[in-house]
Amino acid sequence: MIIAQIATPTGTTPSPAIHQLVEIITHNVVEIDGDAQTVTSPEMFVRKDRNQFTWRTIHLLAVEGDIDTEDQSPYGYPLLPGSVDGVDAGSAAVPAVGMTSISLSLRENLDSAYVDINALTGHEDAYLPLWEATREILRAEGRTKVTAYADHPFGDELRAPSSDLSLAQTRFSRFLLEAGFELTQTETCSRLALPVDEENLERLSADAAAHAGDYRTVSWVGPTPAEYRSDLVALVSAFHLDMPSAGIVEAEINYDVERLVTADQRTADIGITAIVTAAQHSSGQLVGYTRLNIEEGLPAVFQDDTLVLRDHRGHRLGMLMKTENLRRLAEIAPGRPFIQTWNAGENDMMWSINERLGFRPHSGVGQWQIEIA
């Protein structure tokens, strides 16, 4: 088995290697979720790789057979093109049976990395060579704290110290345990079927508004309006520092207005539309926000950040913001099948809000971590 690296795309058209990477990811997602409605397309994979500025991602393939290329990556692996634009040699498909994506933060937690490892059913022998190659790259990059997120069915076999949510074993989790990873956190992946129950939405919204007092909501689609940028920077920073982590990577964030503006522009360039609703105090300060992401070509909608600053909690602002954002979604992108989100097992408050909105558990997620020398 040969481990090859996929080069950063130089053009906009995904290469056969990128297509195979996505096919392997799709195979693994369908195995747990039962559908591929949340899997990014090869074209979107290329766009994301070309528009990164706070992360650097390295993609590997496990290949059975020969690879027709003389190019080598900086880490010494055969190099396959990431896009077909202007590429002839080495652009043919190879018999790939597994993949790894290594994500390296360029702004914070510079001793950590995230890895996503997948293999086709019946090719679990690809896990070990992929992990060995991944570990070599991480050592070369000085990354010692490694996190892998893995999808799981619910079950009784695996439990993290941080919550009572338990998961079932999978072929991948068995490998992670053998490799020395520890399960440090469990999350619920839940879905809200669309369209929402309008009667329930109105009832929840009216109740939240009755408790909101000196607060109202403001919403926008796409880039953050200039008058809200400073407040949103503070909210995003608070979200990342407040988010349950239960692991070896400590919360750290280096966020500013320049980074927000760049991120907004690149998000739009990629083809992702953000719908944001914020809670605004009578003083004019934004004290909370929630965000939905709509990805071009993808049926599913993703519920990402939701936060209310600690000093402003207790006014049902989380529910107020979420109900308003659901109305915005119905106006902007009707016909979507569902919203998908994730809640840490210990985050009972946010799960309570989501459950009342109609979210239902769909699958589990395990945060697996290891420290390497």
Image (cartoon, helix red, strand yellow):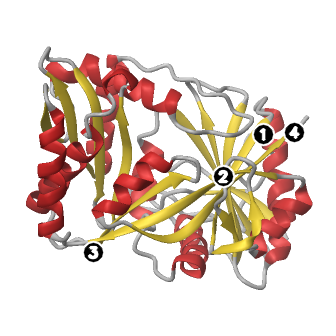
Rendering coords of residue 83 (x, y %):
48, 58
Question: Is 213 left or right of 160, judged from the image as shown?
Answer: left
Q: Residue at x 68, y 75 (%)?
A: 155
Disc nearest the viewer among 4 and 3 = 3
According to the picture, the residue beneath numbered tag 1 turns out to be 138
SS category of the residue bearing label 2: loop
Disc nearest the viewer among 2 and 3 = 2
Rendering coords of residue 25 (x, y %):
58, 70
According to the picture, the residue beneath numbered tag 2 turns out to be 163
- Closer to the N terminus: mark 4 or mark 3? 3
Q: Residue at x 78, y 80 (%)?
A: 123
- Is label 1 in contact with label 3 (beta carbons under 8 Å)? no
**Pointer 1 local density, CA inside 10 Å: few below 14, some 14–19, many at least 20:** many
According to the picture, the residue beneath numbered tag 4 turns out to be 372
SS category of the residue bearing label 4: loop
- Is label 4 in contact with label 3 (beta carbons under 8 Å)? no
Rendering coords of residue 74 (x, y %):
74, 40
Q: Amino acid at mark 1?
A: Leu
Disc nearest the viewer among 2 and 4 = 2
Q: Amino acid at mark 3?
A: Pro
SS category of the residue bearing label 1: helix
How far apart in space, not on screen, are marks 4 and 3 (Cα)?
41 Å
- Is label 4 in contact with label 1 (beta carbons under 8 Å)? yes
Asked whether residue 41 appears in the rendered view, the answer is: no
- Closer to the N terminus: mark 1 or mark 2? 1
According to the picture, the residue beneath numbered tag 3 turns out to be 337
How far apart in space, not on screen, are marks 1 and 2 (Cα)?
29 Å
How far apart in space, not on screen, are marks 1 and 3 (Cα)?
38 Å
Q: Amino acid at mark 2?
A: Ser
